[in-house]
Amino acid sequence: MTLKEYILTCNKKECYDFYVKLSSKPKKYNQVTRNDIYTWIISLYHADSEIILKLCSTEEINVLKKLLDENIHKRENGYIDYLIFNSLSHHFLVLANEEEYYIPSDIKNYVKMAINILDEAEYSKLDVTISAILGISKIYNTISLSNALSILREYAIFYDDIKAFKKEIASNIKLRENIAIVRHNKEEYLVSLNFFYYKDVLKLRNDLPVAKYSLEELISFGKYNLNLFDENILHFLNFLELHLTPPNIEIFLREIIFYCGFDINNESVLLKICDGIEELYLETKKVISYFPIWIYNGNNLLYFSESANINKEVKKESFFRKWLNKISGN
């Protein structure tokens, strides 16, 4: 199947969202057809094939290199492979049939042109920077711009000032898709768009020191939503891959990240997230303390003062009840 054939038959919103993300002056939904979007994509790649590289992580670029030589057969892919191929599919660079992944023939030359102009050292450095910024947003959910810049400086990722940092976010496709800058109590915050709860996080913040993570850990969070440099989390992921499909792992982890992020600390809720499966519940319970807690500035600590928890209990109640009803199907 060509990309044109796929776009003409896929959900229009799927391709329209991609169009809006990359177009500087997108037309309204009802003013553009699927064929218009396809023509626009081809024109975009024809004018600047480097756009393809800007959409991809280093791992995704490596997959595209392999696909230029031959299609990649589907197999029982793990969670990480699933995320990589899912991202490439989301950006309409890779399609799949029942047996294999492939680059559509009508954009293959543009992908080849992009790979030919690839400066691997430059893109590797950019990938580290982007992944670290995304990691910070996922670990803390909300963090002041000054604190975010301070963390980046510790790992020799420098911006002249907040204005330069904002410009980077606005100009980088992967960043503006996943993070935003908001003002709260006269201060600007970097917030994650992967979980739409930053307003609640800001209300529930507790003034504790910001937890420290290595650059490798920031990158792992940024790419995979997990700290794969923690042996406990790595073993947990191996367990999940033995019992769940990659799409279900992604859904399950989103619920666990939320559960830990808001420090829900309720075993009956955790059991519901685990769908009442005792083995999954017991394995998950072992690693809860290794996930970041958003409302305590990213600290993955086991215990906090009783007064801090009491002060936030009322605010948490109504929001969590709504979320609990959602995951319970009520």
Image (cartoon, grey):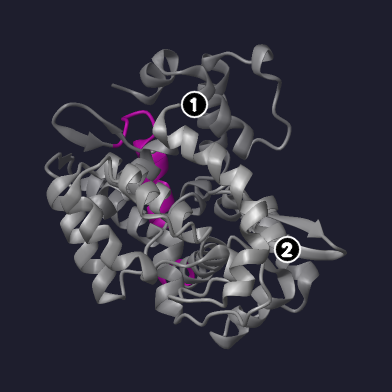
Q: Give the vertical position of 1 relative to 83 (above or below).
A: above
Cα separation, mark 1 vs mark 2, equals: 29 Å
Q: Residue at x 58, y 70 (%)?
A: 296
Q: Residue at x 47, y 76 (%)?
A: 303
Picture coordinates of residue 106, whole percent (x, y): 37, 28
The residue that mark 2 highlights is: 189
Q: Position of residue 188 (x, y in %)?
A: 79, 64
Residue 269 is situated, as x and y percent measured from the top left of the image, at 39, 47
Amino acid type, label 1:
Glu
Main secondary structure of the magenta stretch: helix
| 53 or 233: nearer the viewer | 233
163 and 106: which is toward the camera: 163
Q: Which residue is at the far right?
A: 186
Task: Left or right? Give the position of 128 relative to 65.
Answer: right
Reply yes or no: does residue 116 show up in magenta: yes
Q: Amino acid at mark 2?
A: Tyr
Q: Which residues are magenta?
A: 103-123
